[in-house]
Amino acid sequence: MATPTAVLGVSAYYHDSAAALVIDGQPVAAAQQERFCRHKGCDQLPTDAIDFCLRQHDLVPADLSSVVFYESPFAKFDRLLATYLQGQLSALPAFVAAMRTWLPTKLWVENHLRGHLGRTLGKQVPLLFSDHHLSHAASAFYPSPFNQAAVLTVDGVGEWSTTCIADGRYAELALLEHIEWPNSLGMLYSAVTRYCGFKINSGEYKLMGLAPYGDPRYVERIREQLIHLADDGSFALNPAYFDYTRRLRTYNQQLETLFDAPTAPLGAKPTRHTADVAASIQQVTDQAMIGLANRAAASTGHTRLCLAGGVALNVVSVAAIERGTDLEQVWVQPAAGDAGGALGAALWACHQEHGVARETPPTPDGMAGAFLGPTPGEPPTDHHPDAADPLLPATTNTDRTAAVLASYQLHAQHLDDDELADQLAARLAAGATVALARGRAEFGPRALGARSILADPRDPSTHRRLNLQTKFREGFRPFAPVVLRDKAADWFDLGQNDRPYMLATDPVTAAIRTEPAPRVPDDDLAAAAVAVRSQLPAITHLDFSARTQTADPERHPFLHRLLARFDARTGCPVLVNTSFNVRGEPIVTTAGDAVECFLAAQVDLLVIDNWLVDRHLQPPSALVARRPSARSDD
Ligand SMILES: [Fe+2]
C-alpha cells in the first residue's frame, strides 16, 4: 500500500493562528490556536493546534510529507518596506511598530517551526511556503463539491494581493487576476468598522449586524468619494481618505467629514448615525462583491463560484451574490478567514506539490461539517489554563470528562443519545437554554452544533435574555437559527437548499412574518432589536432575514435528532444556535472550558458529550468558576 500523503498547514503571526492536517487531499484535523490557549484571535505559532493535528492521527513530524506555511513572509516584508519607504518620514512610527513584530517573529517562521517540530523539518520533511491568496483559494476550491469552479478570494491584504480570481479544475488551481494593496475591500470595511466604534479584526461582524438598523443614505457618497467600482468588477480606493499605508491609523479626518460626524469612541453604543453608515458600507460591499463574482465567472467561464478570505464571511454579501448574479451555485469555505489559510496551504501542497489526484469532487463537500477540531475530553494542551491542573488525571477521554465534572462537584446524568435528545427538547420547549459541547469542535468562526448554545426562537424574550444575561454582549446583535433541512423551506426562502455552515442570510417566509412590521421610535435601536417580526422573533432581523444553518442527519446526527424532537413537541423545527462562549472569549473546546463558561453564563443546562448537568439541581457551592474570567468588552 502506498504511503499516504500527509501535509501539515500552518497560519500564524497576523491573527487567528491555526493548523490543519490533510491526508491524501482530505482535511482530517484543523483547529485555531485560540481554542487551546484561550486568548481570542491568538496570533502566536499555533503549537497546541499543531500538536492536536498530529496526535489526531498518531503522527510524528517525520511522518509528514511536508509542512506548509500559508504565505510568504519575505514577500509580505517586501510590501511593508516598499509601503513605508513611500510614506517617508510620516511613516516612521508605523515602520518602527511593524519592525517590532516582524524582526523577532515573522521573518523567522522557519526557525520557530523547526524549534517546535524538530530538526527533520527542512531535511527529511520539506518546509514549503504558499501564497496568502493561493492558500485562501485552495481552501475554497479543493473541499468544494465542484470539479470546476471560479474562485474569488477577498480580504484585507496578503503579500500584495487583496483580491484574487482563480480557476479551479480537478486538481489544478491557477491564480488568474488580482487587485493589489492598497486597494482593499477588507481594509475599507475595517476602516468603517473602527469609525463606527468597533475594533478592527473582530468588530466587522458587529458592523454587519448593525447594518439592518440603518438607512443606507451614504451609499452615493461612498461610491463617489471612497471607492470606485468599475464596470469590469475591479475597484480602487481613494487614497486621500486612508492612512494605513503611511501611519499607525487606518483613515484620516476627511472620512469623518464625509460621514458628517467624528469617529465613535471604541465600545460606544450604536446610534442611528452609525447604523446608517453601517447600512451604507454594507450595500457598497454587496455591490462590489457582485461585481467581483461576475468578473470571476466571466474570466473563467465557470458557472459555480467558491469564496474565501475574510470578506467572504460577510453573510449578507454572500446572499447578495447568490441572488444578484446568474451563478448556479456558490460554496464558501467555512473557515474563510486566515485560520482557513492553514487548511488551504496544506491542500495546495497536497495537490500541487505532491500530485495527489482530485478526479471527483468530495460529496457533499470535503469539510465534514467543519467538525475537524478536538473532542471535549481530550487532554488540556501545553498552553491551556488547565494544563497543570492536578485534578485532571490522564485517563481516557470519557473518563476525563467525568473527572472534570467531579472536580467541580457537579451532579451530572449520563444518558444515551435518545434520552438526551428527549430531555433537551422538553426543556427547550419549556424555555430553558442549553449549552452543548459534543464531539469534534468546529473549525472556523461559527458554532454549528458541536459547541453551541441553543434556545427556543419562538419566545420574544429569548433575544434579550441571550444577549444580555448569557453572552453579555450588545443588545442589538442578532442570533441565528438552525433548522431541519427537510423542513427549512416552510420557514425560510432559502437561496440554497443545503446550508450546513451558516454562511449566508435568507429571508423568513411571508407566511411566518408579522405584518405590518412593528413601528419603533427612530433612534431606539434596542427596541427595534426586540420588536417581533415573525413567529421566530429571536432569529428574525429587522429586514426579515436570518443567518440560516440547515441540519441534516449525515453531518449533524444529534442536532438533527434534537430538532426533530423539538418539532414533534412544538411544531417548530427551528432552534436558536449561538456560539458557546461569552463576549471576548474564544468558543469553548475542552470539558473544563465548557464547565467554566456554563458557570459564567446564565445557561440552564450543560451537555458535555452524553453528560447532562442541570444548573437548578446543583448545590450553590458547585456553581463557582475556577478560572479568572477573560471576558472583555471586545
Ligand atoms: Fe487573508
Image (cartoon, rainbow, N blue to C red):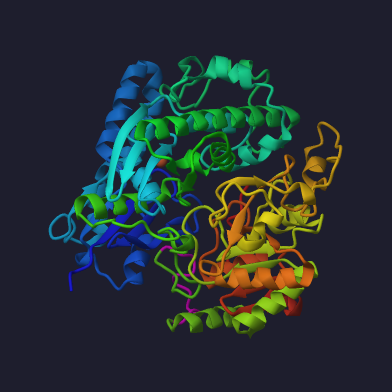
Residue 28 location, quadrant: bottom left
Residue 543 location, quadrant: top right
Indicate the quadrant containing the C terminus: top left, top right, bottom left or bottom right: top right
Q: Is residue 191 left or right of residue 1?
A: right
Question: What residue do we see at 31% from left, 47% from top?
Answer: 70
Q: What is the x, y in percent for residue 361?
A: 36, 56
Helix, strand or loop for the magenta stretch, by majority: loop
Q: Residue furthest left?
A: 123
Residue in the foreground of this view, choosing between 362 and 213: 362
Q: Is residue 33 left or right of residue 160?
A: right
Depicted 391 relative to depicted 206: above or below:
below
Judge whether residue 384 is colored magenta: yes
Question: What residue do we see at 33% from left, 53% from top?
Answer: 10
Judge whether residue 419 is colored magenta: no
User: Which contiguous range is marked in magenta?
Assistant: 383-393
Q: What is the x, y in percent for residue 616?
A: 76, 76
Residue 132 location, quadrant: top left
Depicted 466 relative to depicted 203: above or below:
below
